[in-house]
Image: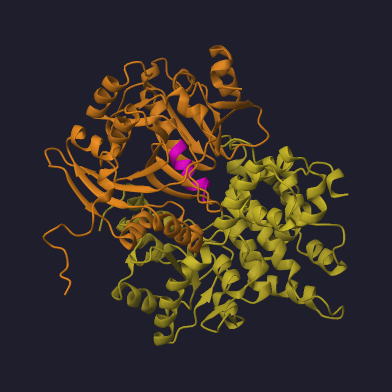
Amino acid sequence: MRLRDIPYSEVGNLLAEGRLGLSTGPFSYLIRGDDAAITDGLYRLYGDFKIEIDPTFCGIPITFEKVSHSYERALSISKVWTGQLLAHDKCKADLIFASLEWAMNYAVVYFEQRWIIFHAAVLQKGDRTIVISAQSGGGKSTLSTALAAMGWRLLSDEFAVIDPDDLLARPICRPISLKAESIGVARAWFPDADFGPLCMTESKGLVAHMRPLTEWVDRIDELARINRFIFVNYQAGASTAVEAVPKAQALVELAHGSASYDTLRETAFNGIADILQDSPCIRLNYSNLAEIIPLIESDEIFETSFFSEEEAPETS
Amino acid sequence: MINDRPANRYLREASDVAAILRDPDGALPGLSQRRIGNALHLARRLGLGERLSIEVLKNGIELDSKIQHAMESWALQGNRHLPNFRLELTELAKELSQLDIRGVLLKGTAYGVEGHPASEGRRLGDIDLLVSVYNIDKLHQTLLSKGWQLAEDNYANAEYYREWMHEYPALYHPSRMVVLDIHHAILPPTDRMFADPALLLADSRKIGDGRYWALSPTDQILHAAAHLFRNGRFQWALRDLFDIHQLIACLPTEDPNSKLWENFASRAEQLGLTAPLHWALHFTREIYGDESYSAGRDRLERRTKPNWPISKLFPFLVENSISPSLWPGKEPKAHHIALWILKHWPLPRTRAVFSKNFWLRKVGTPQ
């Protein structure tokens, strides 16, 4: 059963009672909270996802606890828990939905240590599966939205989730978290897409979430073999620069950005190394999407060698 | 059959958690997937998720894939703590041996270094170390001069700890980020119970490869009990009681003529910890115990029993404080003050209230 199959009014009741189990790929959430913002946000952005009422088990419990009731809704404050951990201490009413998204991310890092997880977007087209890794604010979501607009299937915008047993990427298809100008850009590419509430946050500025396309969610059980890596960095005004990244360096960077490396240790090391073996890795600095999208589309960009023509090592 | 037992008055919804921990092979076949899932859900809230997952996976029972994956995640997490401490323990041991100080590890880290069954899947927050009160200044200063730093910048709180607590302000080394608590006693000086640290140190023994020491097995139980019932919080009570349950189970009792329980009683009296010992014995029996306890243990439990009305009131208040609820944020409040008083009976000395740092630390004065 999908979330859109049950009436809106019932979703609110189920959430208030903590009976709604929501699955996003390998992760399942049990969300409990009595607030219209949660019901509304989930209904708008997670309509295509599988749900289970009174599920046998959900890996990640998330609770919203109202601590101050106020006649002014804007003044009411909630505590957000993931399991027994306090994810957000004083959550104001206008941040409720953004806070739910963060709690869902936070919980993945804390609860799902058996998976090789790193902070990256994963997209697929044909037999090409690209991991786009970036620092926060590095233009990862913007680039993945742009590729999605070119017909790439989005497996995940926030986390690359890999099963250490078969080294295949698990789609999670969560809504795309967009910041500031990217929101307008994404709206232009996806005029029909639904967006979550605009939230003004202290740490990230303006944030909005884009509903994942129904097609992506329908194919959520289709696993993918990763075979391209892009370490991306957006700099306003910068000219496009591409360089190849040595495998060892890529391994270190991926391990560094991995949430479960400390727990999985050798398993994670071997897993990442195996995937990197057959995957070209590049570092990409960009400011102009129009320049780089065709390069990625044509796969040309991955043919960058370590040495440019002039610097090629002399062979005698 | 374990599963037919009535729901435990302390555990209520979490009865399955205790059943699985007590006897995984006996309990698991009788449990549905939903009940196993719920048990994991609750165990995670009680600080027992890692251990429960390890036990369930070891049993090999067929699980739903979601439960299986969650159990794998938690079992892996349970085994990551001690390896992460290894480097810190090595560095600390060097400093201790240079200063010629006996470093006695307390609680979780001690179980881990010793290889005690209680350490399996046990979460470790920080390294707790007990040293003689005569050495603690020297050690603390040396560590600060060798690159360790105070873990917090609230100067008044640090001073308050130095003056009024049984441990010095926490340290950590920036390259390893493991928090180190150095104790000179197991109870704060404000507590009217005084478990003489000199006696504890005198009975300590070498563990592991001999770089570290631990309290004697009975003192470990007394310390765990004192920690839980005097200065601990009840949030992890079921985890702490499970520690105690395993520590007791591993006491050497093969020899029926051994004076184990009698000696235990006199040790508790010597350290002034009879009441915490009684509650530790009482609650581990109520929650994790079976009916086959030895007469010696029963006698000890009766002998250490506090007077009426504390003996009646305390279990009643504990009952409403440690039973977990499925959702967070519903901690019972009504009994907290009464429970605090009973836990701290006889009431602590109030001298600390008159020190300026007691108040300044609440404001927070950066160094």
Residue B143, image x, y percentages: 35, 74
Q: Is residue B345 visible?
A: no
Residue B230, image x, y percentages: 59, 58
Q: Is residue A306 above or below residue A234?
A: below
Q: Who's yellow, chain-wise?
A: B
Q: Who's orange, chain-wise?
A: A
Quarter of the picture holding the C terminus of chain A: bottom left
In the rendered view, does B218 fall on the left or right side of B291?
left
Considering depth in this image, is A211 or B200 the residue closer to the camera? A211
Residue B277, image x, y percentages: 70, 63
In the rendered view, does B45 fall on the left or right side of A56?
left
Q: Which residues are magenta?
A: A104-113
Identify which residue is drawn at 62% across, 39% down: B335
In the rendered view, does A39 fall on the left or right side of A234?
right
Say if the magenta span includes residue A107: yes
Considering depth in this image, is A296 or A255 the residue closer to the camera? A296
User: In which quarter of the view is residue A292 placed?
Assistant: top left
Q: Is residue A90 visible?
A: yes
In the rendered view, does A253 fall on the left or right side of B202?
left
Considering depth in this image, is B292 or A169 the residue closer to the camera? A169
Residue A86, image x, y percentages: 47, 41
User: In which quarter of the view is residue B302 placed?
Assistant: bottom right
